[in-house]
Amino acid sequence: MSTRTKGEKNRGLEVFGAMLAACVLTCLWFFFVYKTVPFIYDINDDVAMRNVAAGVITGSPDAHLLHMKYLLGLWISGLYRLAPGLDWYGLTLIGVVLLSFALCLYRGLVAEKGILWKIIYTTAVLLLMTALGTQHVSAFQWTTAAGIAGAAGIFLFYTAGSGPKWQIYLEEGIAVFLILASLLIRDDVFLITVPAAALCFLWKYAAKEKWQCGKVTLPFRLTHLFVPVALAAGVVVILGVEAFAYRSPEWKTFRKYNTDREAIMDYYGLQNYETDPAVYEELNITPEEAENLQRYSLYLADGLYPDKMAALAQHEKEVYTAEHPLKERLSTAYTEIYQHFTKDTYHPANLIALAVIALVLAVAAMKNRRELGLGLGFLALWFGYWGYLGYRDRLLERVGFVLYLMAIFLFLAIWYRILALGETDDGTKRQPDNAGTIRPGTILLTFGILCVLTLTATNTWRNVRDYNTGRRDYNLEFLDVNRYMAEHPDNVYFMTTFSIETYTDNFTIKRDFAFSNLLSVGGWHTFSPLENEKCAKLGITDPKRDMAEQDNVYVISLENVNLRYMDRYFEGVYGDAYKGRELVDTLSYGEQSFEVYDLVVEE
């Protein structure tokens, strides 16, 4: 066996060992968090998509998750089919986050460094995982999972630089997979990730020399083109499958309607009837139906799907634009961005991000001006993200977390190239006597950083545990309501939207899912092919009429939700024949009480 072959074999074993050790450490960290912190779904969107994939909506697992890409939906729904009894949606999102963390651990464990350096690196990463990751693993959601995957992909790609070529290609291939995972989970996050990834690619592989591409001569040369080619190929496959999965006229119509619904309900808002009667009169929407729309009772508006919703969305966009001129939107954006930089709910992510940015910029200014250029270039892009999202009024807290995490991962990648790889301004490595020198100041700084991270991680773990415990107990109330409905399988229950919105769900690895006899009076499933299939299975042909006329159909609402709006609507539909709501049951769980009503209509 040649020396080269033997060396590559040994390096292969080192890479495998580092990957295995990283996965084991990450699993141990996960089980510690899982045993000490309650796990919950952070937002309702994930619960809704989980219910589609698990078969709660139609009775069988389905891949049309709508917001996530169909290819990922195929994976999750397929797991529910093959191995029921586990919460595969939650396991998939948690798994993506854990894989991202494991690859960050792997980066240090596979480095050609001494054991002490690897111990310090591993300790620091585990503390960062606790400080930054405990919240996003135990209260998971699709947006931050996509953001962590994309950011970890950038980190792994930009820090791949030592070892044989096959190792670099392997690591860059995994990085491409992580960035594609962000597209599969949430395309908006992918669009945030790609410009930052492209910047890192150009900084890493663009050279100032002429490059002959066919008959065209370029003033720069690019290497490792398999990275953007593989990324582009993956995007084409994912989007191609997506287009094929939603090719039917029913899905195309619903997706357009859903975009209009989101524009109104999530961004522009909806004027009440008294403020803007002309548009409602033009669309033949009654005052009662207009109030129903404001209360998210989408089924209680005749002919809403899809044309009236499209007209309302266009009108509300025009109203919003007219009422919020450019100067006002810029001023509001500045105020909103400032709030997102100072919010306590971002701690410690925002503080760690700002500290990492400052420290790495200082190191780059002293040791590597080229990497300083990348850091400043990314900051320009980063603040551009903040400005654009603030101007568009799209700065949600989960998006803010994505931006902070991306900054942390990218600047730590710059740190790694400068200090761990010993890269100089011209891209070569510093001599070992300079790169390996350990000064007393470095020891003190490292010790201080580890102490701060330890305190931060401990405090974060405690805060997340307390917060998740409260939300877990709150979610138990809604689980009791679901059990009540399951005990009456012959009935159909419509729940008012504002009675559901504050609940999410609790996560456990083992979980059985079954077809539900619960329908929402209005939500993002409403009017979808999936919801239509569910209604057909429940014997619902016209929700707004069946709600009042069928004997086995009931309305459930929190007792503090005023249902007079519903009474006014049905009085307008049935006149004197509508006799109001009859209270048939009261469900008291914890601090909340739910009321079950039968709507009475005389024949």
Image (cartoon, rainbow, N blue to C red):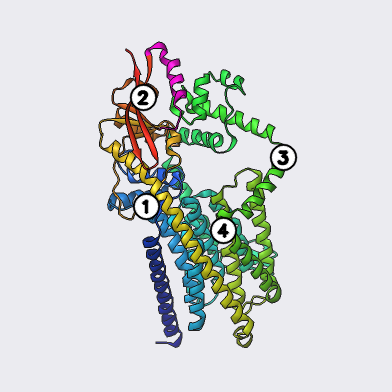
> Which residue lies under the disc numbered 4?
347
Query: Pointer 2 and pointer 1: residues touching (CB < 8 Å)?
Result: no
Above or below 587: residue 7? below
Q: Earlier in the sequence, mark 2 or mark 4?
A: 4
Q: Position of residue 597 (x, y in %)?
A: 35, 26
Query: Pointer 2 and pointer 4: residues touching (CB < 8 Å)?
Result: no
Magenta stretch: includes residue 325? no
> Which residue lies under the disc numbered 2?
547
Query: Pointer 3 and pointer 4: residues touching (CB < 8 Å)?
Result: no
Mark number for residue 328?
Answer: 3
Please tell me whether mark 2 or mark 4 is closer to you in this view.
4
Q: Residues within 10 Å of mark 3 (few under 14, many from 20)?
A: few
Q: Give the distance between the C-alpha atoms of the residues marked 1 and 3, in whole angstroms.
A: 42 Å
Give the SS element for disc 4.
Answer: loop
Please tell me whether mark 3 or mark 4 is closer to you in this view.
4
Q: Main secondary structure of the magenta part?
A: helix
Give the SS element for disc 3.
Answer: helix
Quadrant of the rendered image containing residue 362: bottom right
The magenta stretch is: 559-577
Q: Position of residue 401 (x, y in %)?
A: 55, 55
Rendered-image quadrant of the N terminus = bottom left
Q: Earlier in the sequence, mark 3 or mark 4?
A: 3
